[in-house]
Image (cartoon, rainbow, N blue to C red):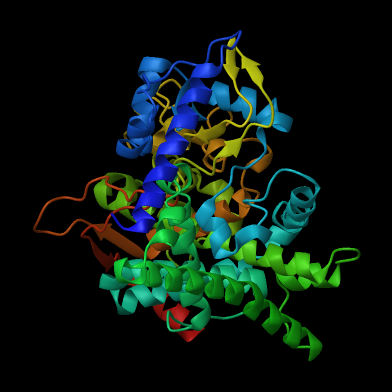
Amino acid sequence: MPPFALVAAASGALVLTIGFLLSRSRSPPHPFPPGPKPLPLVGNLLDMTTSMDWTTFSKWTDRYGGVVYLNVLGRPIILLNSIKANVDLLEKRASKYSDRPQFPLINLAGHQWNFGFQPYGKEWQSRRRVFTSQYNSMATLRSFYDAHRSAISNFLLNVLREPQDISNHLRLRSAQAIFDVTYGISVKSFDDRLVSTAEAVMDVVSLALNPGMWILNPIPIFNLLPGWLGGATISAKIQRCQSDLEDLRNVPFDIVKKSMAVGTAKPCFTTNLLRESGPVSEELIRDTAAIAMGAAYETTFSAGEVFLLAMTMHEDIQRSAQNEIDSVIGSDRLPDFIDRERLPFVTAIMKEVLRWHPPAPIGIPHELLEDDIYEGMLIPSGSIVMVNIWQVLHDSEMYPGPFNFDPYRFIQEGKLDVSKNDPGRFTFGFGRRSCPGRLFAEDSLWLMIAQFLAVYAISPLPEGPPPRAEFTMGGISQPLPFGRVVRVRSDAARKLLAELQED
């Protein structure tokens, strides 16, 4: 056996033994929450490596309840599968549950400055405060409307030219809106270096947030591999990740700074902060801008793809929304933000898209700072706390028929009613670690849905199997590729698209 393999095997055996002994040595006064029966030495390692998806975690809810306990190599893991448990722990006891575990690949890629992954504390609070100063301000959110409009207009025209390439057009729309809002930068295509860099960074983030990467942490094993077994390739890829992240962090920010110096910068997230910074450092603004860009990019694309899948599978729902648009708006203009309250069914579709398949089904895990007793059960300090957002949004008591795509669940007497079951309340996480970009994401998704349905119809391929609700695994999830046909829905719609081309 090669030396590196001996070291890896010995280290692994030592970790397993220590983890097992530690887990056996504790005799807590309160029982742990229920969960799958652990095996000697490895605990629930096999449960996690063979079942690391939200649907399996959700099945455990029926057997073990809303709080599920696992132990992997001596490390306690808590799955929160119910709305009640998430609210009780992550919100009502937020001071205990707002830390983050270590994400080995995230750290290796250079994300230490990213407050989304930072430990709970003053630095995290100051960075999040800067972010929310822009994304929780209604005046600032309204100032982003033109960026949304521009990106969606480009999307609609790109679909007109190449309807078969709608997924790439949707992804470009996300990039255009985010770079415009964050930096005032206009990107034209996927050939833009900023777009390809953002793609590469978010691919790594999605991989790093997969439970297998941070629970099992294969990074030390990768580091032991010699070049002829792929060690050099892995090392080169990690260096590329670091380089891409630094480019995403610095290049667009430097473009904004230079534009401000010569008076040509567009108002945006970054210019707002730089002009109003006061005691806030440029480094903090630079980092916060990069986080804003990265956080919104992949999630807005994922939600858009879920919308397209749902409309392809449910043409009756699509037609109902189009009837509402035609009745309220007419056919001589596109829907706009001013019409939002008058288009309750379109808004209900947006809400159901976020519920039916959230972009981050398991969210980003929390870490418990101290022992906690919940409903007579001990949740030990240092536990990794996983939020099964997918299960929360498929709770049959809150959302009857949860596996059905049914926007009518949010319509009461012809009006939108999400007073008790708003998916936006849960899709973006719980407590102090919830995503502060919720309102921005909903604005972006709503306008895309309304304007797309005003001019296009989407349907399954005439031949071949119908599309199914199948999704990728990973930190960020989206539909698997599916066949669809996109067409302009009327002569009036074609005229609207022609007017967009003239603008």
In the image, taking residue 123 as reference, residue 220 lies left or right, namely left
Q: For this rendering, which residue is in front, 82 or 241?
A: 241
- Quarter-wise, where is residue 337 in the image? bottom right
Query: In the displayed structure, would residue 62 be above or below residue 353?
Result: above
Query: In the displayed structure, would residue 19 be above or below residue 206?
Result: above
- The answer to whether residue 412 shows anywhere in this view is no
| Coordinates of residue 400 in the picture (x, y in percent) | 38, 24
Q: For this rendering, which residue is in front, 284 or 479?
A: 284
In the image, taking residue 393 as reference, residue 49 lies left or right, namely left
Q: Which residue is drawn at 63% across and 80% down?
A: 251
Q: Residue at x 77, y 48 (%)?
A: 125
Farthest residue toward the left? 463
Farthest residue toward the right? 278
| Coordinates of residue 263 in the picture (x, y in percent) | 79, 88
- The answer to whether residue 220 shows anywhere in this view is yes
Image quarter (top left, top right, bottom left or bottom right) of the N terminus: bottom left
Query: In the displayed structure, would residue 55 be above or below residue 501?
Result: above
Q: For this rendering, which residue is in front, 397 or 197?
A: 197
| Coordinates of residue 37 in the picture (x, y in percent) | 36, 19
Q: Residue at x 69, y 25 (%)?
A: 92
| Coordinates of residue 322 in the picture (x, y in percent) | 37, 53
